[in-house]
Image (cartoon, rainbow, N blue to C red):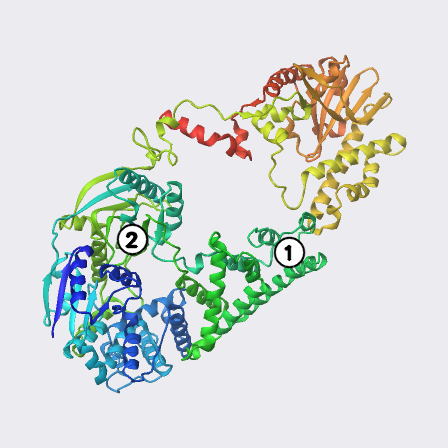
Amino acid sequence: MSITIHAYRFAKELQKPLKELYDEHKDLIFMVPSQDDKRLLLEMLSVEGLAAGFPTVWRWGDLYGGLADVLRRLGIKTPLKRQLDPPDHWLVVRHLVRNALESSSHIRQAIPAIGQSGFIETIGTQLHELIGEDISREDLAYALSCKAGKDNGSCDGQCRNLTKPTGFLCHIYGQYLSYLDKNELADSALIPILARNLLQIRKLAEYLRRHAFVLVGFMSFMRSQYEFLRALNELDIAIDIYKPDPAMGDNFYDVEQQFAKEATINSISTQNEPVRSHLIACGDSRQELETCARNIWFEIQKDRISFEDIAVEIPASYQRILEDVFSVYRIPWASNVGKPLNETFSWDLLMRLKAIKDEDWPFLSVLRFLSDPTLGFNLTEQQLMSLKEDMPSGISQWAAWLKQNNLKDLLEIFRACDTFFNVVRTGISAEKLFERLFKLLDDMKLQERIRRFAADLAPDEVLFEVSKFIEAIEKKALFLKESLPKLGPAQRDILFESEAWEYLRRFAEETRLLPPKRPLNSITLYVDSSPVLASHSLYILVNATSEKWPGKIAESPLLNDQARMTIHENIGLAGIHLPLRHERRQQLEALFRRRLCTATDMTWITCSAVDVQGRPKKISPFLENALNDRLCKEDGRTERPLSRLLPKEEAYLRGAEVPQDKFSRPRKKPIVRTDPRYEGYLSDIDTWIQCPALYAYKSIFNLYPPADVGFNPQICGMMLHRLWQRAWEKRSAHENINLLRCVEELWEETVKSTYPQLLDNERMRRHYDRLYGQARRMAVVQEEILKNLKGVSILSKSEVTLTPLNIDKVSFAGRADRIDHIEGNGQIIWDYKTGSSNSYENALQLAAYALALMKEGKHVAASLYLCHENSTCIGHGSSASKDFVRKLVPKDYAGNFKIKREHLDEAANRAEGHLIEWAKDLSSGSFEPHYDKACKECQYKGFCRRNEIEREETEDNGN
């Protein structure tokens, strides 16, 4: 028998020879790189269901188990080693590294990389690579010039080179191999070596001689895989290798060079024409995907292709953007893999709870957790109001509040969460970690919440994800507890908090849900990589930039290129080859070229000018090389910079896009429409002047954002109005008492009756003290003003309802906080404000009140705002009473009294002009927004689209 290598360019070229081979020889063992390739191979062979003679299709990871099954069918029992999954591999490597660090106190200082968070993963990758090259510990030590290597036959536990990167790696490598052997475990890279050992069993060798191995989609093999294939060849077992041809010449080390002596090489490619490629260059990642989406639709509309003929490959970081873009453009898609657990609702919930615990149960974060409608806690309005008043923080305060409000279920959940996070913080084993997490999910009663909807999970993806998340945690907990063989000492190690969360994170990243059911006629989505056997009419390779292809190829901190060269040059290790940096770059280029040949008709290659952080990006140099080598040819180019975010003078997709020329036509401001109204409130005049649309949102539609938790300015305003009304009543009833004393005597009683939270909640105490100080200062200022009116007859009235002011069938009502009737000088209108006087420099509320009184023939001497924040009185005086108004200014508080230069008569006339225009708006039910500086802080700016319209007007003007 011999080895035959069949080189091909396009995956579609495989269907005919593989189908013919399978139809002629049913006793074949196929090997493919991935699970997806299994499915695609069965499609090529036209095998469906569970028909008799179902072909054997293995991956390298299935090889040892598959051969062990054959032995069992032959009546030979063989011990089956437990293969480490990535999280457990990390756990074992972490155990060995920690043991090594405990043996020497100088390692951390000598090898700084050990302190980095990704070190365990780095050394784990190196171990895979060394095992894949089938290097023994002694050979590695000898190659690295370690005197304790081959000369002594073995390495003892007191390695003298632990403080050297290569020595440390060599030590961990030996310990890792010993650990796997002792605990009957297998690394994924060890599978070919274990399988090769099974070939020594005579009955298995005889069985395999009646079969042939067909390896599809492999460019090259690790040495352990290569030696397994050589062992098959020595047993006279036929081997056919179907290898993608990246057209890189003899400089690329691939399977043809590996089997140059043993193999016969032929080409099955029938198409040597370059691949047609279309480059799409855009401004950023979202525009990149939007341009792909619109171009896909244009291709669909030509009726030359359907969605199921298209595949898109994206980096994982693009997935959420793509889902959003394809949703907007209504493009059906299906992913080749299911969602990982760390992207599910349950993982997000766990991370939210961890953040809450880390911050010691802060009020706002916990309130958001309780308000999540998915969790269905459903607090009553009364309970929510109690929460806003008490604002508990910290687990003890929350426990007390929950107990006080008889929320026993929630109290148990809070205690269960706090207990779980405390246990993890103090240290926990891997086995107990999953047991505790499953118990937490059970205590949170997520299962019970799901069962209410379990009759049909299909409509709600979140419920399905939660159910599968809990199932995965339970399976892992049982697997760690009951499976044989055990993981060994690593399973019993106590993981510190950060290590426990790292282990959980790796499990959540590696464990995936089943992919959702594929919609009919949908695009295939590949994330990060695509199957070797994939073939599509149109293949779209997204983010073909230099940062991805080849990306940053860094040297390992433990086995750099110099150390690798040392191993290569060792005569005793002939055949061992650890890839150097330039060779890893070549491997990536070969993978890039293989993707270019996935399409049967056209490949789109997309890139963006900047990444998500605004850093510039360049097209991959691999594309230029492929063009120069005639592997592909450029067949068109689409360039859409960010300045062309909207289609301009070109076709556009109605329903998903708005053309720039249409959007740039003269635009009217979005006018708020209501039914005609014939009444208004004078107190709203300043809001209407600022923006009629703002007035409509607030006063007509009552659209207010949710009240902030804690201090409530509206209740505060009501409290101060109540305080001054009672204070003036008391002062009028007692001649020998001043206003300050009235405030001091009435303050606490008024607070209790109007805003008791200021007294009951310790967090509100600062507001209580602030407001009390402001009220006392305002009392002093008013008392000083009153002294200037000594001997003058004054009649004071609080909460005075004004006679309605009728303008063009619209009636404007108003109510003044206080009006003083001054004998011989007319009236003074007073209005209390909680804010600063700066906010009322241009206010016309009291001018409108004065206008209403003037229309009745009454003389108004002044209208004044009493502003608590800076204890200032500001307002207008009439031209006829300017001398009287000047006398009001208190001598000792002249800086707290400001009379505007504009007379009250003029302000009233201005107010009347605005009222006339306001009346027109009310009677027509039409309120147009005013765009000014105030829009920047406006909470309703999304409604009136100011930013959107003004930005486009700026672009139209060429700015």
For the residue labelled by badge 2, is the local secondary structure a helix, a strand or a loop?
A: loop
Q: Position of residue 269 (x, y in %)?
A: 12, 56
For the residue labelled by badge 1, is the local secondary structure a helix, a strand or a loop?
A: loop
Residue 245 falls left or right of residue 681 = left
Measured Cα–Cα span from mark 2 to mark 1: 45 Å
Residue 729 falls left or right of residue 674 = right
Q: Position of residue 132 (x, y in %)?
A: 26, 72
Residue lying furthest front in this view?
52
Which quarter of the figure has residue 72?
bottom left
Q: Residues within 10 Å of mark 1 (few under 14, many from 20)?
A: some
Question: Which residue is tagged 1?
Answer: 393
Question: Which residue is tagged 2?
Answer: 548
Which quarter of the figure has residue 830?
top right
Residue 323 falls left or right of residue 636 = right
Residue 538 falls left or right of residue 375 = left
Q: Position of residue 51 (x, y in %)?
A: 28, 66
Looking at the image, which is closer to me, 160 or 48?
48
Q: Residues within 10 Å of mark 2 (few under 14, many from 20)?
A: some
Residue 493 higher or lower than 955, as above or below = below
> Is residue 730 visible from the viewing direction of this image?
yes
Residue 764 higher or lower than 785, as above or below = below
Which quarter of the figure has residue 276?
top left
Amino acid carrying label 2: it is Lys
Amino acid carrying label 1: it is Ser
Mark sitting earlier along the chain (2/1): 1
Identify the image quadrant of the N terminus.
Answer: bottom left
Residue 294 higher or lower than 787, as above or below = below
Residue 443's disc is none
Identify the image quadrant of the C terminus.
Answer: top left
